[in-house]
Image (cartoon, helix red, strand yellow):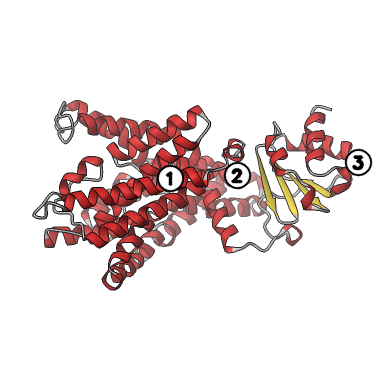
Amino acid sequence: MKYEELCKEIIKEIGGETNIKEAYHCMTRLRLVLKNKELVDFNGLNKIEGILKVNDMGPQLQLIIGSHVSEVYNDFCSIANIKKETVVDESDTDDTSYKQKLSLKDALLNILDTVSGCVVPLLPMFIAGGLISMIKVILSPTALGVIETSSELYIFLDFLGNSAFYFLPIMLGYTTSKKFNSNPAIGMMLGAMLIHPTFINIVNAGEEFSLLGISVSLVNYSSSVLPTIMLVWIASYLEKFFDRNLPVSIRSLLKPFLTVLIMAPLGFIVIAPLGSTVGKYIADILVTATNILGPIGNSIIAALYVPLVMTGMHVTLFTQFFFVLLTEGTESVFFPAVFCATSAVAGMCIGFALKTKSKSNKSLGFSFAMTQWFAALTEPAIYGIALKYKKPFIAQIIGAACGGLYCGIMKTTLYTASGSTIFGIVGYIGENSMNVVHQCIGMGIALVVAAVLTYILGFDEEMESNRDVS
């Protein structure tokens, strides 16, 4: 038997063949219903070569094997002397025999796992784009002054580095489709429509635009994450519906056509603008909180900033507070808190780099910190560390909150719009000579707390090394 050794290792780590109640498989997973889950050695399972990931789903243990799972399953049943069952649909969520009552924590972790699984494959793109953008900033007039912003080299580095983020919805359409076992070409098209030049021009011009008599929210979705993931996720169910109900003779023609025809207006009218709409309400709540709670409001904004970046809701906050800066000449709530949040991101990366035993992860951690400081790009750190390992994300949020609280107490103020890189600290130099000092202290607090907590809390590198990102 081709997979005899793999199956024997699995049986050993799950408590032996007498602990197996039932065994099934789907497109990629070996699904086991066990008599006593306490007999399972999860650490042992995660070390087995040939298992991509282990999912503990209540009464069912799911071992992600890959497309060759049917062959593994046949050998497994023969070795374990158990009856072969019917192949199950991997997308079937109505099978109550495998359901467990998920807690809020489990639900949030599942959402984070899904988002991470869609975005992590794009990490090399984030790294390349981030480092190129960092070089651009270092060479620019705001730093070393080697090149002018009007020079061809600056323009080239600018659009080259930015391409990794501007066209993110298209790339994300592909990886999300792979995650949900749907058509990657359709996923890429759904992502592309969100950043088509015609739509972007309409958004930039602020022109009224409607579909089916319903107004479309004018939002720039470049660099966004959740709109594309939600679109492709829903489209994957639509594709499966057409697979079951369309005649084979016309399925290849009508399935992509109908999927896009339905998802395009639904996406522009309902799904994609959802983050912007929710973001507006969150912005109003946070403004009220800062008025009532004072420095604690600054702390809350700092803590929530990175989670809001993940959803794209931070754009609404940025717009609202940037208007305050333009009209009043100063701003002492949002931007000081954001600087602390991004400093906490860098701190998280440093703590991660110091804690990890992997040389490649150590290099990534330090490079992500540099990218955050010099290019103001949080995406590599968010999707390469925070979402992937979970605990560093908690450390970043706490660090940001501590730094934001200090800046709120000291009432630090942004006098001039100066960007979000480390060089942006010059925007805090103003009539109060200690203002910039207190802002630096707040950022230092955020960085140190995030770094120390990331180091103390640690993270499960072994589990993530087997992560399924397909």
Task: Give the residue at mark 3.
Answer: 81
Placement of 328 over or under 185, stated as above or below: below
Q: Which residue carries the number 2 mark?
A: 181
Figure check: 219 above or below 131? below
Find residue 433 and report its horizontal and vertical position in percent.
11, 51
Q: Which image quadrant for residue 452?
A: top left
Q: Nearer the viewer, residue 68 or 12?
A: 12
Residue at the right extreme of this rendering: 81
Amino acid on which disc 2 is placed: Asn
Q: Which residue is depicted at the point 59% across and 54% down?
A: 237
Residue annotated with mark 1: 452
Q: Quadrant of residue 150?
A: top left
Q: Examine the rendering and report whether any part of residue 456 can be seen.
A: yes
First reached walking from the N terminus: tag 2 or tag 3: 3
Amino acid type at image mark 3 = Asn
Q: Give x and y (percent) for residue 344.
A: 36, 47
Pick whichever of labels 2 and 1 is earlier in the sequence: 2
Q: Quadrant of the N terminus?
A: top right
Residue 4, how many percent across, how many down? 82, 30
List x then y, in percent, for residue 388. 51, 44
For the residues bearing labels 1 and 3, Cβ distance under 8 angstroms: no
**Disc 2 + disc 1, Cβ < 8 Å:** no
